Image: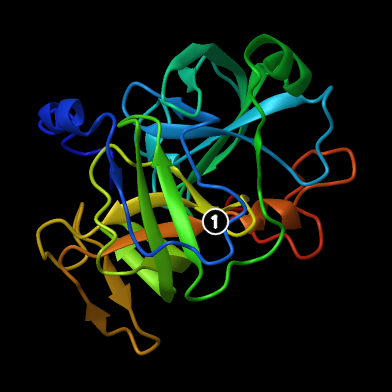
Amino acid sequence: MRLRRTIALAATAVAAATGILTGPAPAQAVAAVNLASTIALNNCSASLVRYPNSISSDRALMLTNGHCYEGGFLAAGQVLQNRTSTRSGTLLNAAGTALGRVRADRLLYATMTGTDVTLYRLTSTYATLQSSYGATALTIADSRPADGSAVAIPSGYWKRTWNCKIDGFVGGLREDRWSWHDSIRYDPACDTISGTSGSPIVDTASGQVVGINNTGNEDGGMCTLNNPCEVADDGTTTAFPGQSYGQQTYWFTTCVTADRTIDLTKSGCLLTKPAA
């Protein structure tokens, strides 16, 4: 998982702090994706996000990976909901300059099973962050992304953006004791690195968040920590050294109610439910 070896890679950050890995230019991009609304955590990346039906007076949301949870890696099958939190991070502007600290008061949802996400509620509203910093949250798309679409992965931790494309979806992805479903596979040139965990996957045509970056096969290992493998329907496993992956985020919108709360009992909700 992509929070590993961030200390060893710290020297790379100095050289790459203002760099951007470029790929094919998106034909229909609404605007170049930059570091605006990304958040630097102490060990991961995160982003300031909103649901499609969020309003300005709502408490703002911060999205990162489940394996970036401040309490450490979650057990297989574990789901956390509605827990107090004091997780904080540094909100960045488009150039990667710090705007100020944002702090959570509640963990709304976290899991490393089925998907790999943590969603926090911040102490500030969207209106407050807009007024104080000019920050506008990224919208979580309400549908799955298209195969072959151009995406950008801005990392608040590294202050660097990767421009990539979606190269299909993986029905089963396994890393050590965790399994994920319908994962996003990037094109082979999309070489995200440790520390990019939790970065939003932004569709360059819409500017909306379609996923969250979470892992890559670093050493060619088969289904081991930091070496995810793809699992076929018949159970056959295949590892692709250097291949990186993300998890879809429209699942949140299948569970959000009209008053913008997460209801795991809602019909059609795709987020992983706690074990009985």
- Left-right relation of 234 to 274: left
Q: Position of residue 81 (x, y in %)?
A: 62, 35
Q: Is residue 211 visible?
A: yes
Q: Position of residue 190 (x, y in %)?
A: 29, 60
Residue at image point 39% right, 24% down: 41
**Of the residues shown, which amino acid type is indicated by label 1?**
Thr
Q: Position of residue 87 (x, y in %)?
A: 49, 18
- Left-right relation of 197 to 272: left
Q: Secondary structure at mark 1?
A: loop
Q: Is residue 113 visible?
A: no
Question: How many labels sit on residues?
Answer: 1
For label 1, the residue is 204
Q: Nearer the viewer, residue 196 or 276?
A: 196
Residue at image point 55% right, 30% down: 37
Would you identify the image quadrant in which residue 250 lies?
bottom right
Which residue is the extreme one toward the bottom? 234
Q: Nearer the viewer, residue 85 or 207?
A: 207
Q: Position of residue 233 (x, y in %)?
A: 40, 87
Above or below 156: residue 88: above
Mark 1 nearby-residue class (10 Å; few <14, some 14–19, many ≥20): many
